[in-house]
Image (cartoon, grey):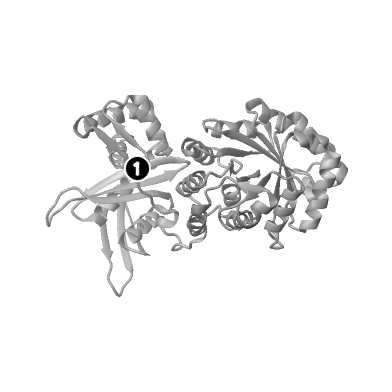
Amino acid sequence: MKTIKISDVTLRQAARQHAASISFKERIEIARTLDRLKTDVIELPVIEDAVADALANKTIASVVTVSALSAACGLSAEAVDAAWDSVKGAKKAALHVMVPVSAIQMEYQCHKKGPKMLELVKTLVERARYHTENVAFSAVDATRAEGAFLYEVLSAAIEAGAAQITLCDSAGVMTPEEWTRFLGEVYAAVPALSGVEVGVEISDMLKMSVACAAAAIAAGAQVIKTSIAPMDCPGVVDFARFVGVKGDELGIAVGLRTTELSRAAKQMQWLLQTERSEGSPFDSGVGGDIAGVCLSAGDDISEMVKVVRQMGYELSEEDTAKVYEAFQTVAEKKHFVGTREMEAIIASTALQVPSTYQIADYLVTNGGTIGAMSSVTLEKDGRRMTSVANGDGPVDAAFLAIEQAIGHHYELDDFQIQTVTEGREAMGSALVKLRSGGRLYSGTGISTDIIGASIRAYISALNKIVYEEA
């Protein structure tokens, strides 16, 4: 029985197709899901934002335990180094060099002709091989490349150290019969392919990608690029269904946890395609506890730092010391400290700053037959600014009003509320986590009015961002 490896491109393609909507937290959730399904390889996109994207990759590297994590490299040695730095903490870290090889794409994307592209391929693969043995090379638009040049590029990539070669039908014009013939010609012209893994990435433009993948496997392919959410490639659910029906007959299998696959795919489809209210601060969703995060009184500062980084925070040495001192105080009383306690400790202890923005007044209306509306007045340097906004709920409206007043939208990474006292005059506590420039800032607020507590928490996090940026 031949086991076909599954390399999932959801995160790599989502960075391009859903750039405006996919949040930091959603990237982590997608990676966790793919890892839980025992996907062989999780592919990450090229780093565009040096801070935010690198931090996302590092966070994913810390939570993925089963799958290999393959970071796509940019088209320079420095970009290769940056990609490696972002995933080197993963248990199975890999680098992915992607280079166009058809004449039209080489000219359009890289402004280079054949000889220069060949030099670039050697440089990039050698640089990646310097960091790790797990180097993958993808010949983008391979099915439209000139045969002789394609064979030369593949040979050069293997010689430079690539352990996996992927041939891409980026245009999506190949039929199953053409894939069989194409791979046969490539194997015959490049004998070195017998010593590496060969994969295929197939566009689904003709809605034949699973059939083409089956033909590619029959012709010798060992790795199939799929996606758990709707993308321009074979869907992993459809491909797994094909293997489930025809696998015994063809002598092939996959290592996925197929019993969970359909449910997980529906969740990922919702995550990437759901339409939220236009401009809502909640457009990136909110989340709860990070699974498995639990500290005890006996844990030292290094263990606490690991947990804090897993939660998405990068603290200074001074703030780390303050947070650890507060953590020890709580741990002595509770013994075990979970995510929610750590969030509260960080929000109330780290990066305490002067109040650039202060709440002067707020008014929120909401009812069964009328939509939520909020008016918020802030003070900054003695100047008042008031904004009115409608939202999906009172908190959403209040946060939108704040954004309109300050003239800036920040990604809302998390929002939590809970009661801290009992009775008719119970106090409510709110936690708001905002992300700016790849970093996480949290604020807390407390009030008998939970909307007021939420507004105070947002302003607390906002003041930390403004102070640090200044």
Q: Is residue 383 left or right of residue 114?
A: left
Q: Image height check: is 172 above or below 128?
A: below
- Residue at coordinates 30% horizontally, 62% vertically from top-left? 394
Q: Is residue 79 left or right of 297 when viewed as pictured?
A: right
Q: Quadrant of residue 470?
A: top left
- Residue occupied by mark 1: 442
**Percent of width and height locating residue 51:** 52, 38
Residue 339, quarter of the rendered image: top left
357 and 199: which one is in front? 199
> What element does badge 1 sit on?
strand
Q: Residue at x 38, y 43 (%)?
A: 290
- Position of residue 231 measured from the top left corner of the image (x, y, whole percent): 61, 56
Q: Which residue sits at x=78%, y=37%?
A: 193
Q: Is residue 144 visible?
A: no
Indicate the position of residue 446 as horizontal and vertical percent values: 22, 48
Q: In this rendering, would 438 be left or right of 114?
A: left
Q: Position of residue 412 (x, y in %)?
A: 40, 50
What amino acid is labelled 1 in the image? Answer: Ser
